[in-house]
Image: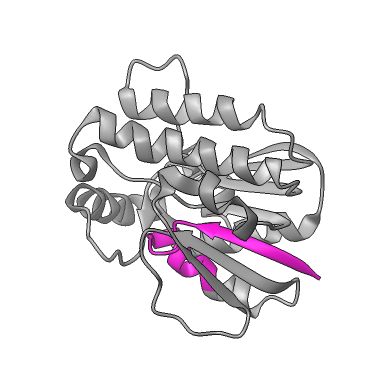
Amino acid sequence: MKTALLAGATGLIGSQLLPLLLASERYTKVIVVGRKAVPVIHPKLVQVVTELDKLEAVRLKLIADDVYCCLGTTMAQAGSKEAFFKVDFLYVVQLAAVSAGNFASQLLVVSSMGADAESRVYYSRVKGEMEAAVRQTPFRAIHIFRPLLLLGERAKPRLGERIGAGVLGLLAPLMRGPLLKYRAVPGAAVAAAMLRAAEDDGGGIRIHESDELAGT
């Protein structure tokens, strides 16, 4: 029986993933790490409340087999490039490093369609740099999920995503074949795909593109 570690449990994907982890027979313990506790009570659930730049200080509380990272923000929410970089690169890479140091087996991390360390778009470049960094960590398996635009209710709605989701929703019936990768993806679909990937217990590095997730 295994332990899951989840970061980003209050976000769109993480909030959908947490109940799946708690219900899964794969896990006897689910550790949630974050700045605030989640309003959930469950016999499997263990909460570690800490600033995400202080993970090293709570390393021994984060021992797990499968590590799920759903951390992420936007430039608008972060308020600056530096703040965005801290959440979408530093926190993610630090979580991976601490977990790998604890001998975790699998890392499952949410990135974004278009992630490219050489991109001229800052958002895409940071996502690509994050992917390159976590690829260097010694997990048995690394799963990277690249949704385009996410559907679902957020605690803090993002106006741009709501507009984009509405437009893509209208166009969805026309999106077939090569256009499938441009469909919006429900956060619940990404969460379900992450758990299935962990249950496969494979090895190596696997990229899950948006069209795969949209067809889930």
Q: Quadrant of residue 112?
A: top left
The quarter in which the C terminus is drawn is bottom right
Residue 25 visible here:
yes
Task: State the image coordinates of residue 144 (x, y, percent, origin top left).
Answer: 59, 41
Q: Is residue 115 left or right of residue 73?
A: right
Residue 112 visible here:
no
Q: Please name the residue shown 38% across and 60% down the image.
A: 11
Q: Quadrant of residue 187?
A: bottom left
Q: Please name the residue shown 75% across and 71% down the image.
A: 26
Magenta stretch: includes residue 70:
no
> Residues in magenta?
1-18
The quarter in which the N terminus is drawn is bottom right
Task: State the image coordinates of residue 50 (x, y, percent, origin top left).
Answer: 42, 57
Asked whether 9 or 214 is in front, the reply is 9
Task: State the image coordinates of residue 91 (x, y, percent, origin top left).
Answer: 45, 41
Asked whether 216 or 86 is in front, the reply is 86
Extreme residue in the front direction: 57
Q: Please name the residue shown 54% across and 76% down the image.
A: 19
Please tell me whether residue 120 is drawn above or below residue 153 in the rendered image: above
